Image (cartoon, rainbow, N blue to C red):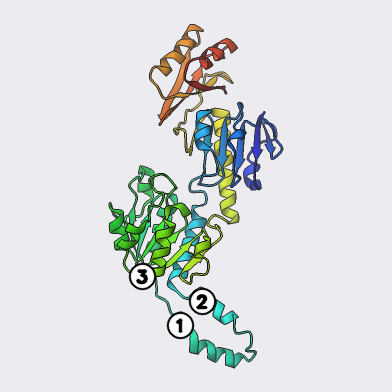
Amino acid sequence: MHRIQTFNAISDKGLSRFSREHYEVGPEVSDPDAILLRSHKLDASAIAAGLKAVARAGAGVNNVPVADCTDHGVVVFNTPGANANAVKELVLCGLLLASRGIIQGINFANSQDQISDYAELSKLMEAEKKQFQGREIAGKTLGVVGLGAIGSLVAEMAISLGMNVQGYDPALSVDAAWRLPSQVKRIENLSALIASSDFITLHLPVLDATRNLIDAAMFAAMSDGTCLLNFARDEIVDSEALANALDSGKLAKYVCDFPRPELRGKSNVIAMPHIGASTAEAEENCAVMAADQLMDFLENGNIKNSVNFPALYLDRAANAEQGTRLAITNKNVPKMLGQILSVLADQNINVIDMLNKSRDDVAYNLIDLESKPSDAAIAAIAAIDDVIKVTVL
């Protein structure tokens, strides 16, 4: 029986993936094998000896102590792409709000509560609508910074709306490149993209390399009247440089999902309350993906969409007995695999299939055995220096 502790309200569509026969799932579960959460801030003290995985039903893992998890051999999963369509649609909303006087016009119309006569109200609307005139996005240039699951969908959407799209992503993966529409013009220099875009939209994670990426120099490179959209992470934009760009008029509009006290009340800021992924469909998609990834890991040791472990998938050997797969995590140092296999050989246990991969300072191994190892063999592997965790599946 696998034990899953949940935090936050996880969609029933995700929770229903766990069979009651093999899983105990809920917020009251103690000593869990895995934790499933959304935005709950997980403390490092939650990483108990028996914990094997943490799954975040969402893309960002800033609420999970990833480094501590890695040190304890705990795999951290996220669900990239599961909420991509929800964010893409909100970016479209942001583009329209930035280019047209929609909010201002609605506020003006709603403020005329002293007028009860329809003809009088209509005459006023016709007379004043010119102050809310905007510009169309068709024919304008959108610069997409970050061309992953969300960025590629945004690029495709913008192309269908008649925009010219250019993209920047120095870490573009092969899979992401395949997803990217051919009409997207790849730009190798961020400053060049920023200088030649009417609208800029950010779709990057927060890393050391991306924190305050949009700084004073980047704002200086923008053409006057540029609109910046940030539905990624607040920390990607330097707050002081942003305020200066807004006050000087260099930046015409800032549309974001992260309200800041110092920006409240600015007419050229549209701040939403972090609702990019707040749709029923996105929450369901994230929960289902997180649950499926957890199950495949707990049952088979396979890893997909981890932020701290290598991706690894190994089919179960057809002639392997039930319960004879080992999942072993160790520090990524030389001679580890040889030591592990030596223990198995000394126990006369035949290896029938295996896969080993590493990521940064951690290595992960799946080993299918012809027979079930003894407790002594498992203890011997666990006792090897730099072995972090051994699990029999």
> In the rendered structure, which amino acid carries the disc numbered 3?
Gly
Mark before the other along the chain sequence, 3 or 1: 1
- Residue 157 visible in the picture: no
From this view, report whether residue 124 is shown above or below residue 36. below
Neighbourhood count class around disc 2 (C-alpha, 10 Å): few under 14, some 14–19, many 20 upward: some
Please, what secondary structure does the residue beneath circle 1 have? helix
Residue that numbered label 2 is attached to? 104
Looking at the rendered image, the quarter that the C terminus falls into is top right
Residue that numbered label 3 is attached to? 225
- Camera-side residue: 204 or 313? 204
Q: Residue 369 location, x and y as percent?
A: 51, 16
Mark before the other along the chain sequence, 2 or 3: 2
C-beta proximity under 8 Å, tags 1 and 2: yes
Mark before the other along the chain sequence, 1 or 2: 2
C-beta proximity under 8 Å, tags 2 and 3: no
Residue found at x 58% / y 20%: 323
Residue found at x 30% / y 61%: 221
From this view, report whether residue 265 is shown above or below residue 108. above
The span from disc 2 to disc 3 (Cα, nearest Å) is: 18 Å
